[in-house]
Image (cartoon, rainbow, N blue to C red):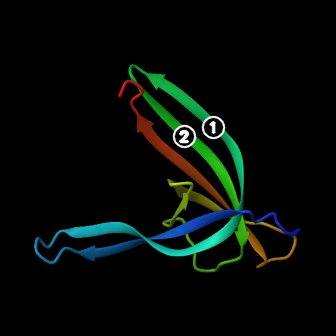
Amino acid sequence: MRAGELDQSVTLLELERGQATTTGYPLEEYVARVTIRAQVVPNGGSERWAQVTRDYAATHRFHIRYRGDIDETWRLRWREEEFAIRAILPGGRRLREFIDLIAVASGAENPRT
């Protein structure tokens, strides 16, 4: 890895499960655990127009230094958008140096508002 390639700031979000104290309902929310540096590479994307809403899904590869605590239930926040991790792949010739996180962002927006 050459200097300067990990040029983007990415926040790792971990799913935290608990119970509401007043209602007793189970709670699930993503909590920011750490901010790291990453190289972000878009893998592709697709846009689909359905009546007045646009559904957008894009796949990105986040190349980061090795962390053993990440799994597929975590999410990433990059440029104020959240990405769900779909796969964790080895990211270099040497094991435990870098990993690639394949993540998908999806959302819907109404272009008329």
- In the picture of the structure, the residue carrying the numbered disc 1 is 45
Task: Indicate left or right for 9 with 99 as reference.
Answer: left
Residue located 83% across and 68% down the image = 92
Residue 100 in percent (x, y) is at 71, 63
**Residue 9: image tag:** none
Between discs 2 and 1, the one toward the N terminus:
1
In which quadrant of the rendered view does residue 43 lie? top right
Amino acid type, callout 2: Ala
Distance (Cα) linking label 2 and label 1: 6 Å
Residue, far left: 22
Residue located 11% across and 70% down the image = 23
Residue 36 in percent (x, y) is at 63, 72
Q: Is 48 or 110 nearer to us in this picture?
A: 110
Task: Indicate left or right for 95 with 48 as reference.
Answer: right
Label 1 near label 2: C-beta < 8 Å? yes
Residue 83 in percent (x, y) is at 53, 55
- In the picture of the structure, the residue carrying the numbered disc 2 is 57
Residue 83 against residue 106 in the figure, above or below: below
Residue 84 against residue 58 in the figure, above or below: below
Residue located 39% across and 30% down the image = 110
Amino acid type, callout 1: Gly
Within 10 Å of disc 2 (Cα), the crowding (few <14, some 14-19, many 20+) is some
Within 10 Å of disc 1 (Cα), the crowding (few <14, some 14-19, many 20+) is few
Which quarter shows the C terminus? top left
Q: Is 66 or 82 nearer to us in this picture?
A: 82
Q: In the structure shown, which secondary structural element does the residue marked by tag 1 occupy?
A: strand
